[in-house]
Amino acid sequence: MVITKGNPLTLFASSSLMGDMLLLLNAIVWSCYTLYGKKMMLKYSPFTLVAYIHILGTLMLLPLVLIPNRLNSVTLWEQIPHITLSAAGSILYLAALCSVYGYYIWYKGITEIGAVRTASFYYVSPLFALLAGIWLVNEPITYFDLIGGIMVVSGIYMINKYKIMITKPQD
C-alpha cells in the first residue's frame, strides 16, 4: 500500500526496486532470526543469548573497521582521536539502548508472549519511521500512508486480541 501508493503493478517499475526488495529480504531474514532465536532460548536465557549475539557480531565486524579495505579508507584506530564526546555518547546510546536492550526486550517478548505475537510488533517500525519523517523533515502524509498504518495497527490488535487462534489449534 505505502510503497506502491496503492498500485502494486508499479512495484517492479519503481526506481527504488532494489531498496524495496532489500526491505522485503529484511523482513524474511528477521523472521528467520526470530524463529531460530526461539529455538536458542531453549538453551539460553534472553540476556545470555543477546550477549552472545553481540559478542559474535562485534568479533565479525572488527576486521572491517580495524583493517583498511574497500569499504573504509580510514581505520577505527585513525578515527579514535577525532571522536567527540557527543559522538561517543551517541555510540553508547545506540549500543546500550537500541541494540542490547532492544534485542533483549525482543527475546523477552518471545519468551513471554510467543514468537508470532512478538513478531507482530516488528511492523510498528515503519509507522515510527513515517511519523519521524513527518516530524523531522516535513514529509507529506498520503491516504495510502494512513490506510497502511490502519492496516498495521489493526493487524497487531487482532493478533494480540485473538491470541487463542494463534497459539492453540482449533479442533
Image (cartoon, rainbow, N blue to C red):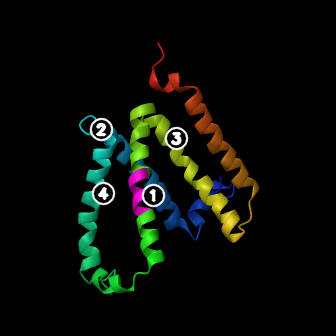
The residue singled out by tag 2 in the image is 41
Q: CA distance from mark 2 to mark 1?
A: 21 Å
The amino acid at mark 1 is Cys
Q: Nearer the viewer, residue 70 or 98?
A: 98
Seen in the image, is 11 located left or right of residue 57? right
The residue singled out by tag 1 in the image is 98
Q: Quadrant of residue 162?
A: top right
Q: CA distance from mark 2 to mark 3?
A: 19 Å
- For mark 4, give the secondary structure: helix
The amino acid at mark 2 is Met
Q: Earlier in the sequence, mark 4 or mark 1?
A: 4
Q: Earlier in the sequence, mark 2 or mark 1?
A: 2
Q: Earlier in the sequence, mark 2 or mark 4?
A: 2
- What percent of the width, then of the height, locates residue 164? 51, 22
Q: CA distance from mark 2 to mark 4?
A: 15 Å
Q: Nearer the viewer, mark 2 or mark 3?
A: 2
Q: CA distance from mark 4 to mark 3?
A: 23 Å
The amino acid at mark 3 is Ser
- What percent of the width, then of the height, locates residue 94? 44, 63
